[in-house]
Image: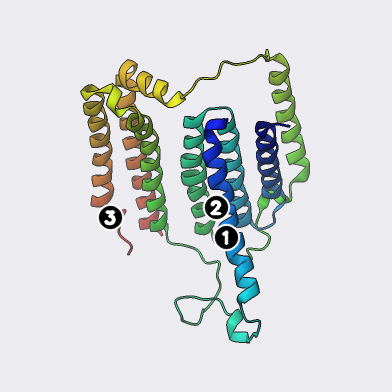
Amino acid sequence: MYEFNGIVIFFILGLLMPIGALIGAYILAPTKSSPQKYLTYECGLDTRGETWVQFKICYFLYALVFLVFDVETIFLYPWAVTFQQLGTFAFVEMFIFIAILIIGFVYAWKEGALEWF
Amino acid sequence: MGLEAISFLVLAIITLSSALALVLSRNIVHSALFLILSFVGVAGLYLLMQANFLAAVQILVYGGAIAIILVFGVMLTQREDMSSTNLFNKQKGLALLVASVLLMVISRVIWLTKWGSITTIKTTVHNIATVMLQQYVLPFEIVAILLLVAMIGAIVLAKKVEKAS
């Protein structure tokens, strides 16, 4: 447990920073309000229509590709930590691992899964 | 009360209250966000048990990828009113039945488990890396192929949907 004290300090600081920013804004900000201030901000333009709209399926493809590479990261993590002890063989192994996944990435690219429109 | 007990209590409260908020929330997007918080709480509990690799996996996969898939799933489906979209909010009787059966199963397992003190391993990551990259080389590479198949399959399916719509 005591090895993770750093994480606790990090967590507490991470919690205090936004709270501090909010309190600071609360104290310092002028309280004069106008209807324009309550409008939803969207790149400076007036918002139009409903907020909850159906999204295009192509965004979902990004999520799927992200998921696969996220799982790949899990396998990279122990390898990266013990990289120096494991030697060349593990390096080659990981290279093959990544190469196989890059085939999938190339396929996704070719199929236009990474195109917006 | 030691530091460990306090940490456990804080994490348990975060995990359980966010899980409860997930079930009780009327807006399904809020439910998804509470689910992420619950996942992160569980990751903290793993960390408390010295299982640092598992904690990293929990945050990366559950807190990151699964949560994103879930939020995307919500975003892709169209609804008129988002304020009361949590479907599971209305099926209290069924939920009670399923939850009590699950509780019974878990209680049985807890009852049968022999509780004892465990020897804490300093770092689990090194052991996992050694086993994964030296002992089970072939299964490790097969995992890559499995991921490849999953990715290609997902793209093929999603492309088919996109063409149909």
> Disc 1 marks which amino acid?
Pro
Asked if labels 1 and 2 touch by Cβ distance under 8 angstroms, the answer is yes
For mark 1, give the secondary structure: helix
Find disc 1 in the rendering and name its residue. Answer: A18
Image quarter of residue A67: top left
Image quarter of residue A82: top left
Q: Nearer the viewer, mark 2 or mark 3?
A: 2
Find disc 3 in the rendering and name its residue. Answer: A112
Say few, some or many: other residues with alpha carbon within 10 Å of mark 3 (under 14 / 14 to 19 / 20 or more): some
Residue B127 drawn above or below residue A4: above
Q: Position of residue B133 (x, y in %)?
A: 32, 22
Residue B161 drawn above or below residue B134: below
Report the quarter where the N terminus of chain B lies.
top right
Q: Any mark on residue A14, and which? A: 2
Residue B30 drawn above or below residue A27: above
Residue B69 drawn above or below residue A33: above
For mark 2, give the secondary structure: helix
